[in-house]
Image (tube, grey):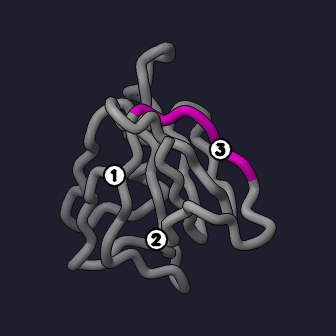
Amino acid sequence: MIYYASHYLWHAGQNRLFRMQRIGLEASSHHFVSMEPLEEEVRQTQWLGGLVVLAPCQPEVREGESFPHFCLRVSQSVTGGEPLYAFHVMGFDLQAMDFTSRSRLVRL
């Protein structure tokens, strides 16, 4: 297992935003396996900060699209049962809880 933690985690299958979460990914396939609240520093966990997105495929951030619109669009494409992957959103504005012109998703 590979573990990551971040300030926020958005789960496309649930269309829900979680705060301070630790996720586990299967080491060979990088499929999402588990999540739990991050209540203290945990060994073998890489801190990413910002936002991590769980989705069945790499979603695109459309120019000028707000984070709420992104969430709605991507969650509607989830059919259920498919494996989820984790994507770290680089350049996410945590204060505004929105994308910036520099935002991009990097698969973990």
Q: Residues within 10 Å of mark 3 (few under 14, many from 20)?
A: some
**Does the CB distance between marks 1 and 2 fall below 8 Å?**
yes
Q: Earlier in the sequence, mark 3 or mark 1?
A: 3
Q: Residue at x 42, y 53 (%)?
A: 69
Which segment did they paint magenta?
31-36
In this orientation, which residue lies closer to the viewer: 89 or 98?
Answer: 89
Q: Is residue 33 magenta?
A: yes
Residue 108 - label: 1
Residue 86 appears left or right of 38? left
Q: Residue at x 50, y 41 (%)?
A: 1
Q: CA distance from mark 3 to mark 2?
A: 15 Å
Please, which residue is most extreme toward the bottom here? 95
Residue 51 - label: none
The amino acid at mark 2 is Leu
Q: Position of residue 25 (x, y in %)?
A: 47, 40
In this orientation, which residue lies closer to the viewer: 88 or 24?
Answer: 24
Q: Residues within 10 Å of mark 1 (few under 14, many from 20)?
A: some
Q: Most prominent secondary structure in the magenta stretch?
A: strand
User: Vertical placement of 1 versus 10: above or below?
Assistant: above
Q: Position of residue 105 (x, y in %)?
A: 27, 59
The amino acid at mark 3 is Met
Q: Name the residue tied to disc 2.
A: 48
Q: Residues within 10 Å of mark 2 (few under 14, many from 20)?
A: some
Secondary structure beneath label 3: strand
Residue 30 appears left or right of 80? left
Q: Earlier in the sequence, mark 1 or mark 2?
A: 2
In this orientation, which residue lies closer to the viewer: 3 or 99?
Answer: 3
Q: Name the residue tied to disc 3.
A: 35
Secondary structure beneath label 2: loop
Residue 38 appears left or right of 32? right
Q: Residue at x 27, y 71 (%)?
A: 103
